[in-house]
Image (cartoon, rainbow, N blue to C red):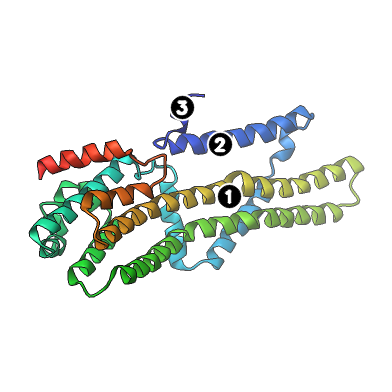
Amino acid sequence: MPDACFSDGDPIVLVVLGYVVVVVAVLGGYALTGGHMGALYQPAELIIIGGAAVGAFISSNSGKAIKATMKAMPSLLKGSKYKKELYLDVMALLYVLLSKARREGILFLEKEIADPASSSVFSQYPRILADAKMMEFLTDYLRMMVNGNMNAFEIEALMDHEIETVRHEAEIPAHALSRVGDGLPAFGIVAAVMGVVHALASADLPPAELGALIANAMVGTFLGILLAYGFVSPLASRVEHQVSESIKMYECIKVTLLASLNGYAPLVAVEFGRKVLYSTVRPSFLELDDHVREVKSLT
C-alpha cells in the first residue's frame, strides 16, 4: 500500500480506510457464511441505539464538555500541525529570544513579550503567533524569568501543574467519546431485548415469522458492539494521539526555558528541547544546528 496513505497530512484517508476495512471484514465474513444482508437492515434498532447514545452523551457531560467534543470532531480529519518544521520554528524562536536576552539584557524579553504581535522577533513566526494557547504559555514563563522572583525548581513545578491541566482539559473530548463507545454495546442489548419482547408478544405467529423477529432483535447487539469498537472508540484514540502531540510542544518549551534558567547557553538549551520530541518529528542535531545558524545570520 502506498506510504502516502499513511502520511500525517491525510488523516481523512486513514479514518475512511479504517472504517471501510471494518465494514468489509464484518459484512464480508457474514456473507461468506451465507448470511442475508437484508436481515441486518434494522433502522428501528439504529434509532434506539443512536438516540440512547446521544441522550446519554448529553446528560453525562457539561455544556463545556459537549462544546469541546463537537469542536474536536472536525480536527480529527485534519493533518497534524505539529510537524518538524513547526518544532524547528519554535526552537529557533527560543534561541533568538534567549540569545538576545543574554546580549542585550533580560529587559529585552520584557519589551518583546509586552506586545508579541508587533515584536520584531515574534512577528517572524506567524504560525506560532496563531497558536494563542502556546503563546500564552511561552510569554507567561518568559515574564516570570524577567521578574526573577522564582527559581528554576519553582518554575518547573508550576510548568508541570499547568501542562497537566492543559492535558486534562484537552482529553475531555476523548473521555466523552470513550464513554459513549463503552455504552453502545449496552444500548445494543437494550435494542435486542426490546426486539425479543416484541417477538415474544407475537408468539402466535408461525415459527418462520417468529424466528425472523428474534433474528432481527439480535441485530441490535451486533450493531451496538460494531459501532462501539469499530467506529466510536477509534475516534477517542485519535483525540488522545492529538493531545499527546500538542503536549510535546509545551514540554519542548518547558525543557528549553529550564535549561536556560540553569545557566546553559541558548544553543545547548534548544538541544535540550529537541531531545524531548518524538522521533518521528524530531529534527536531527545537524538539522537544528543548520536552522539555528540560518536564523543567526538573519538576526
Q: Nearer the viewer, residue 176 or 98?
A: 98
Q: Which of the two marks, 1 or 3, is nearer to us in this view?
A: 3
Classify mark 2: helix, strand or loop. Answer: helix
- State the residue position of label 2: 18
Do the numbered discs 3 and 2 sit on residues whose CB atoms are within 8 Å? Answer: no
Classify mark 3: helix, strand or loop. Answer: helix
Q: Amino acid at mark 1?
A: Ser
Q: Position of residue 212 (x, y in %)?
A: 82, 42
Q: Which of the two marks, 3 or 2, is nearer to us in this view?
A: 3
Residue drawn where x is 18% and y is 55% of the image = 98
Furthest residue in direction bottom, as rendered: 149
> Could you tell me which quadrant the C terminus lies in?
top left
- Is residue 197 shown left or right of residue 240? right
* Label disc, if present, on residue 233 of the rendered structure: 1
Query: N-terminal of the two: label 3 or label 2?
Result: 3
Q: Amino acid at mark 3?
A: Asp
- State the residue position of label 3: 3
Classify mark 1: helix, strand or loop. Answer: helix
Do the numbered discs 1 and 2 sit on residues whose CB atoms are within 8 Å? Answer: no
Residue drawn where x is 68% and y is 35% of the image = 26
Residue drawn where x is 14% and y is 61% of the image = 109
Tally of numbered discs: 3
Q: Position of residue 174 (x, y in %)?
A: 51, 56
- Is residue 91 shown left or right of residue 215? left
Q: Nearer the viewer, residue 245 or 11?
A: 245
Q: Nearer the viewer, residue 95 or 203?
A: 95
